[in-house]
Image: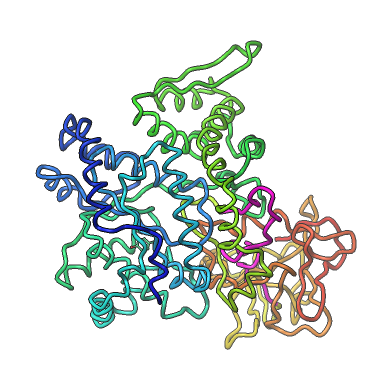
Amino acid sequence: MSDYLWSGWGWTHADRDKTTAQTTSQMAETQNKMTPDEKFNLITRNLQEYLGGDEMKKILQERDIKVYWGTATTGKPHIGYFVPMTKLADFLKAGCHVTVLFADLHAFLDNMKAPWELLRLRTKYYEAAIKAMLTSIGVPIDKLKFVVGSSYQLSEKYTLDVYKMLAMVTEHDAKKAGAEVVKQVESPLMSGLVYPLLQALDEEYLDVDVQFGGVDQRKIFTFAEKYMPHLGYKKRGHLMNVMLGGLSGSKMSSSEPDSKIDLLDDEKSIRKKLAKAFCEEGNVDDNPILSFLKIVIFPLMSLKGENTFVIKRAEKFGGDIQFVGFDAVFEAFKEKRLHPADLKSGASDALCALLAPIRKIFEDPALIELTNQAYPPADKKAAASAGGAKKEKKAAGSEPSSPAPKKQPAPAAEDDNASIISKLDIVVGKIVEVGPHPDADSLYVEKIECGEAQPRTVVSGLRKYMTVEQMQNRHVLILKNLKPAKMRGVESQAMVLCASNAEGTVVEFLEPPAGSVAGDRVFFEGHEGTPEAQLNPKKKVWETVQPDFKTREDRVAVWGSVEFRTSKGLIKATSLVGANIK
Ligand SMILES: N[C@@H](Cc1ccc(O)cc1)C(=O)O
């Protein structure tokens, strides 16, 4: 790689020293007032977890902590990124030396989520977006150090360290370390195994005491703790932020654009999306809006010495309401003194205030141009990158989206935003054996051929609806990549998809087109992609798409308006129209 990836970032040593000098003078006042314990509490507040707390406390007795946060420059950052940004603000206030790493090589190594050709542009986009977010929450960006991964990760010394690690890390450990971060695919690439090794080494090369990231990074963090000492390097501490759930809470729906908020969404759509967000009266356990207030809005207020949250309300509904501290909001909501509509309206005001300056920054024509180049519409993308793997960025929980910047044509589906439906692995299966479940009256146990070496064992609750004869030798549709689950002691390795009426009295198979054979893949036109090897139950992919599965008037199975098809044609229910599919 040429050094153009690095040019334009402007982090010369002279700059760094200057900034350090400013940082020291400007922050000296607050920091001097903070005891090491206070600093530690601020550094660790609102985290999901941290490792190495005692060592951090020890360091704080002598000097301030050096910490870095890395982000792979893949899909567009979205509002979930306010969670780590808020922590960066805490770290600065606690006197930390904070480095932000734009992990461009990692974006490539992770199944080419950022294709090589777009890497530099993506990195520039990330720089602009992250800096805009920091500015919006009042963090002076000249107090942070920004580094691009490839600027040092290709040096001789670093490269040699990578090889040394390759000679000591087992494949098992590398795979395990990346399991929650690196996209899991059917034929995993070597690059995905190298990814965690580089992330561990970064701790040494960025010269920090502590690495910070989402709790999804946990396995990479513990991997680093294990292997850094083997290389003769210090074991670092690790700080992990909570991941923000989707806006729709447990009912996260990524197929529904309303469940995600992009940094550039306008006020009207922010309010509309929040108005639709999952926020049940009195439910404080599963409430994305309360979480956002707790881990972003209140901490940001407290950094400015404020803690009063005002919810504007018309006089006729009782006028404005004020809450002092997050606990006051929490209790009021729990006791149903605060209505979801009011909570949403207060949160909308706060979020609009955070996003307005970012939209303003992105009105700059140069940034509009950069956005379109870094995230080109799908057709141009195909030309820019032949065959880059596709997948969504899994950052802070909620999904990235890509509204068009002002006055630009809307980008079509983008590579880092692969359609959720493409993650499902649905194929034609042939039932070759079927019999009653030994321990459950309502269940059958089948052997279903699905184009693999062995037929799969599948448990289905179909005994009320079909006879053994009706099932034997039938071609059916099966969903192959749900996590296998034991049903009354028998492990089911797939699920048969059926259509059922609203009352649940009629259940029938979905019929593959004539001439189908076991293993024929079902796809959704315009939403093609590589299915996940196994769906992560936490991501609720199935739960998200299933409600939009229906049979049309002509009995054809559809996801929203898109048909289920194989290379041989469309899939239909036997008789049911407007039926559910599950
Ligand atoms: N793994 C981080 C990115 C990262 C890469 C390298 C690092 O050193 C740190 C962080 C992510 O999921 O975005």
Left or right: residue 213 versus residue 471 is: left
Residues 491 and 255: in front is: 255
Scheme by which the image is coloured: rainbow
Predominant secondary structure, magenta span: loop
Q: Is residue 536 above or below residue 43?
A: below
Instruction: Please identify the quarter of the rendering in which residue 227 is found.
Output: bottom left
Left or right: residue 572 versus residue 391 is: right
Magenta segment: 400-427
Q: Position of residue 538 (x, y in %)?
A: 50, 56
Q: Residue at x 28, y 41 (%)?
A: 92
- Whether residue 441 is visible to the viewer of this picture, yes or no, is no
Quarter of the image with the N terminus is: bottom left
Q: Position of residue 339 (x, y in %)?
A: 58, 24
Q: Is residue 212 above or below residue 463?
A: above
Residues 199 and 13: in front is: 13
Q: Quadrant of ligand 1?
A: bottom left
Q: Residue placed farthest to the front in the image?
A: 14
Quarter of the image with the C terminus is: bottom right
